Image (tube, helix red, strand yellow):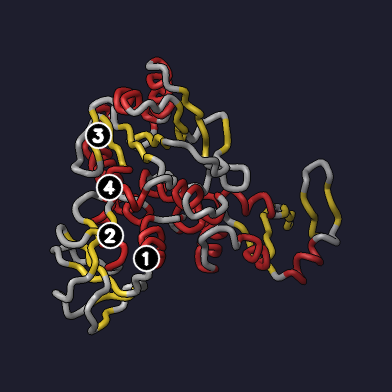
Amino acid sequence: MRLRDLFVEKLRNLGIKRIGVKIRISHSKDIIRALALEVANGKAEVFRGDGGISFSFDLEGKYLPEPPEAYVGREGDRLFGKEDLIRSRYFPIIAVDCRFYDLHSDKEKRKIHLQVTKTLGTVREFMWDEKLVVAAKDFGAGIYCERLEEFLLERNIDEVVLLDPNGDEVFTGERAECYVIGGIVDKGENRNLTKLIGDELEKAGIKCRRQRIELRGDIIGVPDRINHIAEIVLRTVIDGCDVETAIRAVQPVVVAKWRLRKELPKRAVRLRLGEKTVRVLSKSVFKEFDWLNVRITDFYDVCREERLYLVSDEVMEKIKKLKWDEKRRYYVLN
C-alpha cells in the first residue's frame, strides 16, 4: 500500500471525509499525497477540525466549499502523526550508491544527477523522502550518507538486494529491507561497477543478494535508468504488480525498441530470390509484442533498420510452401 493510500485509510478509520490544511505546501496535482508527505516527513501532523478553515478536500482530492473535519498543520487537537501513520507498515529503503561517481565523464555525471533527482520524485509517489538514501555524493535528495555500509550497519541492516544487470539471481518481487541501485551510467568501462559496489558491501559484512531484472528471460528491454529501476521495484513490492507489468509501466519506447530489434529477426524466415537472400516477416507478428511499449510505427521502423521485408499472412503461408533448402536454411523461389 502506498503512503497516500495509507493516509486515506487512516482518515477513513477515524470517520474523516473532509481534510484541510493550515500550512504552506508546494503546488501538487495530488493534494492528498502532498498532505501525506508532509505528515510522513515529520513536518506536520493531523488535527481535529476547529472551524478555522472555510474549505476542504474530500479524500480523492476534490475541492469542497465546506470546513474540514480534520486538518494538516502544526498545532491543535492532535489526531495522529508520522509514527501513528507508518507504524508496522512495509516501506523499503531505496539506496543509490554513488561511490564511483568521479569515474564518470561530465556528461555522465549530469545524467546521474538528473536520475537521482527523478528517483526522489518516484520515491514520493510510493513513500516519503527519507526512504531514499544517496551515498557518496550529495545531490540534495533524500538522506545523504558518506558510506552506505556505515548507514546500513547503524540501522542493523545486514542484508540487501543489489539490483545488478549481471546478478546471479532474477528479481521476482520478494521483499527486502533495502534495495541498492548503483549510481552509475553502466556504459563501457563502467559496466562492472555495480558488482564492485556489492563486493565492498560484502567486505563490510553486509550480505548482498545480487539480482537482475529480466523481461521474459532477458535484461534487454528492461529500463536501466536509476529512477526507472526504483519504480519497477516499488511497483512490484508495494503495489503488488508482477515484474513484467511493472516494467511495461515505465518502459520508454526507445528501450522497448532495443528488445524488438532482438526479437524480430528470430521470427523472420529467409527467402532466396534469384541471386539474393532476404529476410521476410509477417505483419501480424506485431500483435505478439503487446508486452512491449511499441506502436505499429515503431514496429515498421525496426523492420526497416533490420532490413526485414513485411508480407501478409497469406503471402507468408505461400512462402512456407516453397522448396526448403535445409543446408542453407532458406526457402527458394524459382
Q: Mark 3 = which residue?
A: 105
- Residue 14, labelled with which disc? 1
Residue 233 pos. (x, y %):
46, 46
Residue 57 pos. (x, y %):
28, 75
Left or right relative to 288: residue 148:
left
- Give, as a three-letter code, the residue at label 4: Asp
Q: Judge whether 246 appears above or below 27 on screen.
A: above
Nearest-to-viewer mark from 2 and 3: 2
> Pointers 2 and 3 in contact (CB under 8 A)?
no
| Residue for point 52% across, 49% down | 221
- Give, as a three-letter code, the residue at label 3: Ser
Q: Which of marks 2 and 3 is nearer the N terminus?
A: 2
Left or right relative to 100: residue 292:
right
| Label 4 – label 1 distance at C-alpha | 26 Å
- Residue 258, labelled with which disc? none
> Pointers 2 and 1 in contact (CB under 8 A)?
yes
Q: Mark 4 = which residue?
A: 129
Q: Earlier in the sequence, mark 3 or mark 1?
A: 1
| Label 2 – label 3 distance at C-alpha | 51 Å
- Give, as a three-letter code, the residue at label 2: Leu
